[in-house]
Each structure stands twice: as structure tokens, then as C-alpha cells.
Image: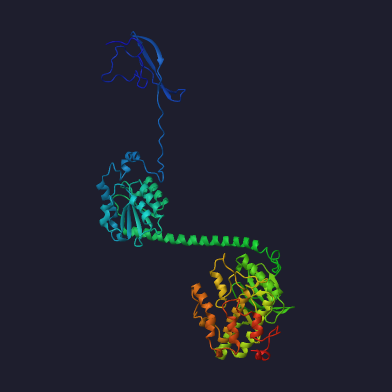
Amino acid sequence: GSSRTGPPLNPRPSRPELPWQGHGKGGHQDTVARPAVAPPTIEFAPCGFPAVHQKAEIMEGGEEASELPVHVPTKPAKPQKPNRGYVRQRLVPQTARKSNLETLSSTSATSHLQLQGQVLHTLSGLSAIAPSLSVVLAHPDLECEDFMDMGFAGVQSWLQFVESFKVQPEFSPDVSGMIVVSPGLDVQAAVDCCRTVDRFTNPPPCIVVLIVPGGEPPEAGGSAMQSVKACLESGADDVITLTAKQVVTGRRVQEAIFRTELMARKASVLINQEVEVVKKKTAKTLQGAWNKFMWDFPGKVLEHIPVVDTGLVEQIQTGVGVGDYTFKDQLGAGTFGAVFKSQHPQHGIRALKVISKASVKNVYQLFSVNTELCIMSQLAVHPNVVRAYGALHTETNIVLVMDYSGKQNLHSFITSMLKTTGETVLPPDIVTMFVKQAALSVAHLHSCMVCHRDLKPTNFIVDDAGDCIRLTDFGLAAMVFGSQRLVHCCGSLPFAAPEVLRLQQQKKATAQGYNGFAADVWSLAVNFVELTCGIYSMDRLLNWSPQPPADAAQRLCDLENFGQVWRQVPEKKTVPGLHRVMDNMLILPAEERWTISRVIREGLGLVGCTHACSVKGCMHNL
């Protein structure tokens, strides 16, 4: 044996020759006896790594020369990462290979035939309801052809299903549920399927069948619960966890589908309730803002509507009254509100037209109320025109104070009289009286440069005695200056003039407007038709029963031809002399049509008459 003559060159500190370890097979045998050395002590070096300090002998010439410490650096052990089961992340294959006891579908450990057999076994209990189910295979090693003979409505791979949304974004109505089969704990493919389901327009309940590894109950594995959570958070309606030996039954799937549909209905009801609450809150907020904005106009911009009087006692809903007015009877109701016969301690009987502020949807309608009040209050007094005395402005309503003219309008009066008498038309003397009074009311408006634009029997009020009518409802009336033409299409069928309907079909840029006075004359003539031939006679002559045609062009054509239709009506069916007057009032060109002054003078012979005439005094003028 040889001895070392000096310290070893480039010693390997990672594998030092420790004196207490001895020599293994084939190792170097020293002839020098080695003294016992104390066990090593571990200290921390300045670099942060622990170093092993030991006393090693350095032999030189067979004699003990000196003792030097040998430092052996070692790396600290890496801290073990806790298994957090990250949701929506694919489990790394390395982890799956390390946990062979917890893996069912690893491609490195399970063959294609074994995986196919496990899934076929799991789905074998769905044969009874298979035609109503669509199956998606959420594993790359599963082939759709292997499951075609099971009778399902459809079988797709997860990639095919994700791409199918772009081609056909709707499910068949025959599919009651979708089964996503996911063998193993890698549920990324199932997650992709669940996210795609919600993109369809009519998705059925989506149920994930998760085949977890191991033979123990699925609930025992924390990783399985993380996989279930990932599927549910991505859009699955339910998750059924099974082991490879278990079979999913049709009853279990049907229960999951029923539970999903029931929860969907309950959720829909709750959502609708919440939406209604939000709508009401939003509507209330918007209504408050709208009221604050719009109802600041009265008294500031609209001079005929006063500012809100918060001191007015309002009991309209209970039918008691408002302010100093006490309701006696309700005379009628319309879109904006109702009309009441009322008693005032000083002014006596009045008619109150209550307009709900909630029904006034825009500023135009507010201006319409202001115009109506302006015209009715500023017109010169006439026995055949209803007069307004002012308005009351409460927190929720605008109340127009008007003359009380009677309980019935002309339409209801004619209907009730014909029903009482059993006749089909009114007596000639009644027709003559109402024709003259209606013409005088329109003549009074035109002399004041006002066009009514909504002349119809319901806007003429008959007094309680039945011998006087008065024109009311000036919501669409317009004050005209000079030869001004009107461009607002308004009125009621079948009383509106043809040129008014024609304006509706013209483009605004090229519309020439219409003569409001001539349009009133046409509408007045149609009212005469109703007076002489009975209620709804105009509809019968136009073949508009039970309702006008839906086509606007056809309605216009019918009205334009009505003048010729009227000329074919025998004169004996009308009051003598009135047929000729109406012929001239129904001339199609508005510039050739008789004016109201010509109707009064030449047609009705009411020269110098400025008020309603009695029956006896005017019969000879027709």
C-alpha cells in the first residue's frame, strides 16, 4: 500500500471521505490507523446555506500535520406546494402520473378499450330516455362511433360541440337534456362545453356526468369536489359524480332535469319580480324628475295653466270633489281624464274636466291643454260653444272649469232617441235644429280665426232639455293667422277631410299643408250625414263596417270618392234642401268647397243670425 504525500488535489466537498463511515467494497485501504472523530455540527454559513464542519486529518508523510475544517454546502429542500385544485385549469399530466391511485382515465395508464368500456357501462342505464338526450364526450380518447348504437338523440365530441354553435346556434326541440361525459379529474373539456351551452338560444338543462377515479365514494376526494365546482361555475346545471363501477340511471337524470327546470322557473319569477321593482322605482324617479321639469312650465311659460296650488283639497278618486267644487255626477271619461257635473257655492253648476298629469306624456300634450284652455276662455260668448272660466292645478291633476251644457253628447243622444222611438233616423225638425246650431258654432269659431279640427258627434253636448247643442273639446284646435296652412295631421275617422289624410302620406319636406277652415267644413258635412241618416251611416256608405280598412291608401281613396257616393243618395232620405248644401260641402278640391259663411248664408239662409235659432223660426229658411 502506498501513502498520500500531501493534501488531495481539487477535493470534492460534496462527497467528503468521513472518518467514521469506513470503506466500502473496492475502496482505498489506508495503513494508518484513524483516530475517532466527534460527530459533525451544522451551522449556517454567511451565504445562507448550512455547512458541515468536521475535523479531517490531512496525512503527510504518514504523520499528523494539522487539522483543517472542511465546509460542505448543501441546498435547502424546496417547500412542498399545497394542492389547491385550481378551478378552470387543466391538471398537469406530471401530477396525474404521480398519483396513480387517484387516476382513472390517464391515457398512459388506461387503454382506449378500457376507457370506452367504462363510459359505455356508466351510460348503460339511460336506454329508456336516450332518444331525448344529447351526449357530448368530453375526453379526447373517446370516439363518437362507439356510442352511436345507444339510441341517443345525438353524440358529439367536445370539440365538435363547441364548433357546432357557429353552424346551428339552436338545439332541437326534441332534446330535453344534454349529458356531458367527463372521465377523470381533468374537466377542462367539460368546462368548455358548459360555457358554450349558454350561447345557444334555447339550451336544455346541461348535466355533467363526472366519472371520478378510485373505488371509494366520490365525496371522499377533494380533487373531485374541485372538479364539480369548476363545472358548476362554468354553467353546468347539475353534476352527477360516479365511480367507474357505478351506472347513471334515467331516473337520476330526469330528476336533475326536473330540478333544473323548476329552479329556472323560480329564478325567472324572482327575476321578474326584481325587474318590476326596479321598473317601478325607476318609473317613479323618472316621473318625479319629469314632473319637476315639465310642471314648472305652467305659470311661467304657459300663462293659462296656473302653478301648482298645494293648498287645494283633492278628493277626485273618491268622487267627492276638488277645492270648493263638489262632484254631483260623472258625465264622461276619456284618454286624459273624466268630466264631472259639479256644484260651487258661489258659481253654481259647472262642468269640471279633470286631466290627470300622469296621462300627459310630453310637452306637446301640455301645450294642447294650454291651447284648449286659452281658446275656450278667450272666445266671445256664444250659445252654441262651451266656455271655460279657468283652471285649477293640484298635485296630480289639472282641472278645467267650464259651462255645464248637459249630460249627453250628440252621439249618445241620437242613439238613445232612436232606441226610444224605434225609428232609424231623427225627426226632420230635430235634424234641422241641430244642423243650424252646429253650423253656427263652427261659423263662430272661424270668425275668430280658430279651426276646431276634430268635429264629430261626441264633441257636441246636448242640453238636458234636448233642444240645444254646444261645441266643446278644443284640444286639437288651432288659431290661424291669415292664409296660414296647417301641417299637423289630426282628427277622427271617418270625419277627417281627405286632404288631412293625404298629408299623412306626404313627405314632410314636400308637404304643402292644408286649409284648416275647409277641412272643418268637410267634417261638418259628415256630421250632417250622421244627423240625417243615423249613427254610423258614414261607415255604411263607405263600406267601413265593422272597421275602416287597415291600408291608409285605401282609406284615402274611399274618402276622396265619398262626394260621388253622397250624390247617389236619394234626396228624399234627407231634410229638404240639405242635400244640395252637403253636395257643396263635400267637394274634393278644398279651394272649390263652400266656406262656412257661404253654408250659413246661401245654404241655410241664416243671414244676420249670430246665435242658435229655434225650430219654428228657421224652418222656412231651408
- Residue drawn at x 36%, y 22% is 14
- Residue drawn at x 66%, y 67% is 395
Where is 560 relative to 467, above or below?
above
Locate residue 593 relative to residue 88 in the image: left or right: right
In the rendered image, residue 299, in percent from the top left (x then y), is placed at: 71, 65
In the rendered image, residue 157, in percent from the top left (x then y), is placed at: 32, 51
Q: Quadrant of residue 103?
A: top left
Nearer-the-camera pick, 33 or 592: 592
Where is 495 relative to 9, above or below?
below
Q: Is residue 14 visible?
A: yes
Where is 5 relative to 126, above or below?
above
Nearer-the-camera pick, 364 or 184: 364
Location of the C terminus (image quadrant): bottom right
In the rendered image, residue 454, in percent from the top left (x then y), is placed at: 60, 76
Nearer-the-camera pick, 291 or 553: 553
Q: Quadrant of residue 377?
A: bottom right
Q: Is residue 462 visible?
A: no
Locate residue 3 relative to residue 259 in the image: left or right: left
Q: Quadrant of residue 1?
A: top left
In the rendered image, residue 458, in percent from the top left (x then y), is placed at: 60, 79
Locate residue 472 relative to residue 28 in the image: left or right: right
Nearer-the-camera pick, 582 or 474: 582
Spot the residue most to the right: 346
Circle count: 0
Q: What's the coloring here?
A: rainbow
